[in-house]
Image: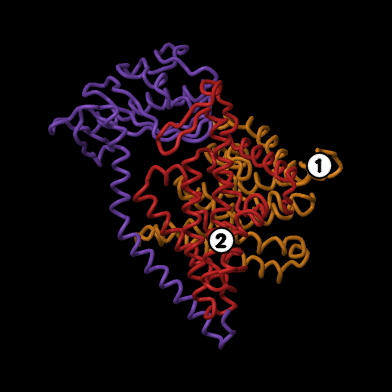
Chain colours: A purple, B red, C orange
Amino acid sequence: MGTRTNGFFPVIFLTLIVFISVAALTLTDAITKDKIELAKEDEIARMLITLFPQMDGFTYDEQNDLYIPLAEQQPLGRAFIAEQSGYSGVISILVGLEPDTTLRGIRIIFQQETPGLGAKIVESFFLQQFPGLAVDDIKLTKKGGKVDAITGATTSSSAVVEGVRKAILDKLNQLGRET
Amino acid sequence: MHSFTKNFLRGIIRSNPTFILLLGLCPTLAVSTSLDNAVGMSVAFTCVLLASNIIISLIRNHVPVRVRIPVFIVIIATLVTIVDLMLQGFIPALSKSLGMYIPLIVVNCIILGRAEAFASKNSTTNSIADALGIGIGFAWAMILISLIRQLLGTGKLDLFGRHLFTVPGLGDNPVAIFLLPMGAFFVIGVLLALFRWMGVSTGE
Amino acid sequence: MSNLIAIFFGMALVNNLVLVKFLGLCPFFGVSKKLGSAFSMGVAVLLVIVVASAVTWPIFHFLLIPYGAEFMRTVIFVLVIASLVQIIEMTIKRTNLTLYNALGIYLPLITTNCAVLGITFINIDQAYTFSESIIAALGAGAGFTLVLIIMSGIRERLDMADPPLAFKGTPIAFITAMFLGLCFLAFRGIIR
């Protein structure tokens, strides 16, 4: 430990350390910034490709917050992110639409439902019920729709279903207004 | 070299941060739901501890006593941010599943504790030994807990996307409660009792 | 308004700091042996969490974001919290000695308490507005205090109980925390 020197030295020392810290972090940020952006895009791309297997790229429509998967420059459909409160916390869902308004399918991007119950919304037996549904059919079976809830996890299943349907309606509304 | 070995071994068993000192439990319990997380967190933690111990032992004769804690905090926070940004950029999946528990390494009592109690008073060589020992001590505790939670909670053992094996009888009906927060409390409680029963004294 | 109520109870009960997020475990096991000290610690943490949230929110949104320096978040927040704790400690010491005697020794411990830093991160990650952040901080602090008080009540009784020798002390406290967590699991789902 350094000896206690005159009054200003500690302050100068601390300031110096903070400056070095800022410099080091600015440098790290400069190196990693592009990588982090790429990683985020990659993640969306990986999910998109499971919905649109023939896609070879995608563009992002910033104005409408839409992801457009492309194959040989031709759009294959549309995709966007829906969010809905589940049993515990927000579930965020990637919703894919065919060029018309039928559902291409959904993927769960983020959830923190109860393991063993609600967390089963990420499993394929649940997700495979969605492709091909018309907007009005995206409800649980007991509410007149075509999606079976997961046993013991009605709240989580309902959150996904309602979240997806509302998001599609909102999105179509928004697009309809603008065109 | 004698003191190097001594300082290295200390953290692994005798003053194991998790089981003996009961320090820095937040990440140990929060992210020990899978082996991937445990390995990732242990590596991140050890990197920060090692770098902080090295830097602090190098400047230990120049730090004014009055501002030493803020200086240590700034150094540790900087290192943690560097690790955090690197993870986000290069291993995004791991960064996502560890979430805010990576930046929270800053307030991990072990790292500031080692800076204050060891690195600021000892040579760089000994500080490296200390950091490696504590890092390994933290890692094996974390891996043991996550191994138990993953095996019982999912009935399977996966490491970095590769499936290693399925526990007979548990594969279809895992005891999912081990993945819930209370599973972590249970596992560590039973492990502590087990170590005490085996004659290791866990400190209060 | 209903949104704010949901955030408050969500933070206090559903996503309880200690039992779900595993933040602030050191005081949870360290200071939960006596009811009185548990209450003081809880109040001290509540105070610091609210003040820290009120200060870090504007710093992040009006300083770090405009200058594109979000990566400085951890460093700045941790320094701000450390200084805040010092300021609060000095203020209480000068103005209210009774309060200082009750809370004084717990305040320095809070500097390295992950609960405080954790909440400021959660406020940012959840994109809460300023008022939502304050409510979230109040809820988190209240939930922390509640759990600490319950735990200390149980532990005062545990001292008189007779668990297997190996479980006496800390191990049985962890098992207790598990049951407490199981009880709080019932709160999941009250917030839709």
Q: Is residue B5 above or below residue A84?
A: below
Q: Quadrant of the N terminus of chain C?
A: top right
> Image point 58% across, 40% down: which residue?
C15
> Image point 56% across, 75% down: which residue?
B67
| Neighbours of disc 2 within 10 Å: few (<14), some (14-19), many (20+) | many
State the mark number for residue C165: 1
Q: Is disc 1 placed on a helix, strand or loop? A: helix
Q: Is disc 2 placed on a helix, strand or loop? A: helix
Question: Quarter of the image holding residue C17?
Answer: top right
| Neighbours of disc 1 within 10 Å: few (<14), some (14-19), many (20+) | few
Q: Residue furthest right?
A: C160
User: Is B173 in front, or is A86?
Assistant: B173
| Residue A19 at x, y percent in the picture | 41, 73
| Residue C100 at x, y percent in the picture | 74, 65
User: Is A156 in front, or is B124?
Assistant: B124
Question: Looking at the picture, which amino acid does disc 1 mark?
Answer: Leu
Question: Quarter of the image holding residue A160?
Answer: top left
| Residue C109 at x, y percent in the picture | 66, 61
Q: Chain of mark 1?
A: C
Residue position marked by numbered label 2 in the rendering: B111
